[in-house]
Image: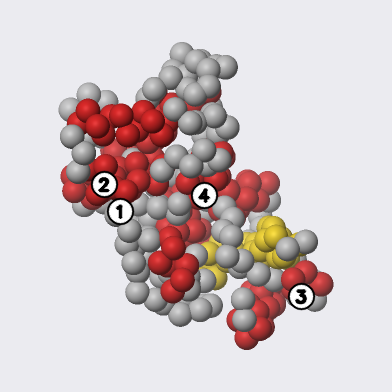
Amino acid sequence: MSGRIVEVLKSLIRKKLEEGADAFLCLVEEEGSPVPALITDPASPQLESLTPGDTRYPLTKLLIDLLRQYPERRFAVLVRGCDERALVELAKLEQVDLDRVELVGLACSEEEARACGCRLPYPSRVDLGERVEPAPDRGVVEEVASLPDAERLRFWEEHFSRCIKCYGCRNVCPMCFCEDCALENPQLVKPGVIPPEFPSFHIIRALDMAGRCVDCGLCEEACPAGVPLRALYRRMQEVMEERFGYRPGEDPDRRNPLSELEMGSGLEF
């Protein structure tokens, strides 16, 4: 990150703390890697190690815990576009209280936007960086969609066969917060079976992401087996948009349509 942006971020953190935020959640560099930091003092030495980093981190998951642990506190947090979308959706699900959170927006660079391929590589308000044109990437989605049904099934069976059930995709996901996870329910997913039975494990998670996934891509980054998870969830996003005109995290006033449907509604994907 350029020295100029570092100085702007320092100023923003000091300003937010002086204006009433109890702490600022961001990233600092330690031993060459970005790690989360909670800055409470405008004169904190951690300000000298600030970095958004080119490696993203699910700060939203930490924010949920902080808001629960400190119900009287106010927090500021550094957010990219996907982080903001996650927080908007989490607010609808009553996991965060955005009245106690101030978002400081970081736009992804052109290089980051191309590498990510999401359609909104910036938050609604940009405090750091500059908006760049999105470069949506549907490469794998289109590849899979072009296959006959039997070959499509084999495509996913081959990729899912590498899964080691490490739960990295779930653990890193900003939208996974359930205390009782269906992926650990022995009636749905047999314990001790690696790879998990095809396709139950990944179908359960994909359905849970319908109307929730904000296309941050952290699941695929975290997967040690290289499973193209993002293509699966992106297709779920497209189905939601085609059927309901809904994109998670983009409209703070509209709830996920699936949360309002009754069981047995006849919904088919």
Tell me the tag on residue 48.
Answer: 3
Q: Nearer the viewer, residue 263 or 183?
A: 183
Which residue is tagged 4? 221
Residue 139 appears anywhere in the view = yes
Q: Tags 1 and 2 in contact by the CB under 8 Å rule?
A: yes
Q: Find the distance from the CA under tag 4 to the CA under tag 1.
A: 17 Å
Q: Is residue 249 left or right of residue 219?
A: left
Taking depth in this image into account, of 133 and 266 the one nearest to the observer is 133
Residue 171 or residue 89, whichever sits in front: 171
Residue denoted by label 2: 143
Q: Earlier in the sequence, mark 4 or mark 1?
A: 1
Q: Hey, what amino acid is under mark 3?
A: Glu
Q: Is residue 95 left or right of residue 2?
A: left
Colour logic: secondary structure
Numbered label attached to residue 139 = 1
Q: Earlier in the sequence, mark 4 or mark 3?
A: 3
Q: Secondary structure at mark 3?
A: helix
Question: Mark 3 or 2, which is nearer the eye?
Answer: 2
Q: Disc 4 residue type?
A: Glu
